[in-house]
Amino acid sequence: MPQLDSNGSAADSSASPARVALVTGAGSGIGRAAALGLAQAGWQLVLVGRREEALCETRSAAPDPALCLVRPCNVADAGAVKALFAEIERHFGRLDLLFNNAGVSAPALPVDELSFEQWQAVVDVNLTGSFLCAQAAFGLMKRQQPRGGRIVNNGSISAHAPRPNSAPYTATKHAISGLTKALSLDGREFDIAVGQIDIGNAATEMVRPMQQGVRQANGSIAVEATMDVQHVADALVHLAQLPLSVNVPFMTLMANRMPYIGRG
């Protein structure tokens, strides 16, 4: 498994080969924190997202940027995902971990005011993008030697309970739970462990409005507790380093005081 030079090209190395992880949505927030946590643990990384500049910022923050391959990609584009995984196989020969993290949301509008395009954009990234990456990872993990690997899907607390005016996001995150279960079952015979981490109120740019106050199920506006996103990175690294004989199908990681248990 070759290391990478500063330009992301394969380079010879006499060091012991590191495991390879792909993180989608790696340019910011949970994706960046997860990628940097894995990098700190010695993983080689493929940093995927739409914004190359943001991905390069993540790579620059890694302990050894030379171990990070930056590849802009729209995960909702089947052709782009196929090309991405073909390149991963050429560079590394394998993939040990896929963190299906990329996600978007629609404006918080009543369902009858949402456009079809707003609905479709969320489905394309959150659900179809996760499927396409998992599908390609399955193919590579089945044929690589030694075979197998781990896939972790980012489900969100919305995989369990919705926020007001969140039909597209909530629907896709509920669907991710079904995808996780199906892939976990299908992956067993190939030593592919598939699980899901449902994250609540990790302190990223996306949840900043919650610290100002967001609408609750009863119509009130309330400030919500958040947690350090580093805890998410630590949890993912723990999952990633488990042997493939062990799976954590579902993990919920949340700010203790956030209104999830009892939401609504």
Image (spheres, helix red, strand yellow):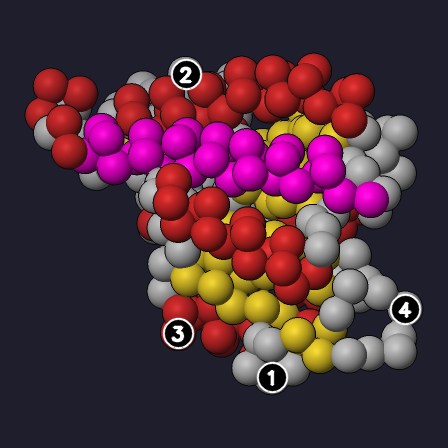
Which of the image's four quarters has the N terminus? bottom right
According to the picture, the residue beneath numbered tag 3 turns out to be 53
Circle nearer the N terminus (4, 3):
4
At mark 1, the secondary structure is loop
Outermost residue, bottom side: 6
User: Which residue is under mark 1?
Assistant: 6
Which structural element holds mark 3?
helix
Q: CA distance from mark 4 to mark 3?
A: 30 Å
Q: Which residues are the magenta region?
A: 118-145
Q: Residue at x 41, y 30 (%)?
A: 127
Rendered residue at 39%/50% (across/down): 80
Residue denoted by label 4: 16
In the rendered structure, which amino acid carries the disc numbered 4? Ser
Side of 123 where 193 appears, left or right? right
Q: Nearer the viewer, mark 2 or mark 1?
A: 1
> Tag 3: residue type?
Glu
Identify the mark nearer the N-term, 2 or 1: 1
Magenta segment main secondary structure:
helix
The label nearer to you, 2 versus 4, is 4
Q: Nearer the viewer, mark 3 or mark 2?
A: 3
Q: Are marks 1 and 4 in contact (CB under 8 Å)?
A: no
Which SS class for mark 2?
loop
Q: Give the class, few, some or many, for how many residues have Cα within 10 Å of label 3's Cα (few <14, many ≥20).
A: few
Tell me if 238 is positioned left or right of 87 in this view: right
Measure how far apart labels 3 and 2 are at the Cα level: 40 Å
The tag on residue 48 is none
Q: Quadrant of the C terminus?
A: top left
Residue with the mark numbered 2: 264
In terms of sequence position, does the residue under pointer 2 or pointer 4 come before the other?
Answer: 4
From the image, state whether disc 4 or disc 3 is nearer to you: 4
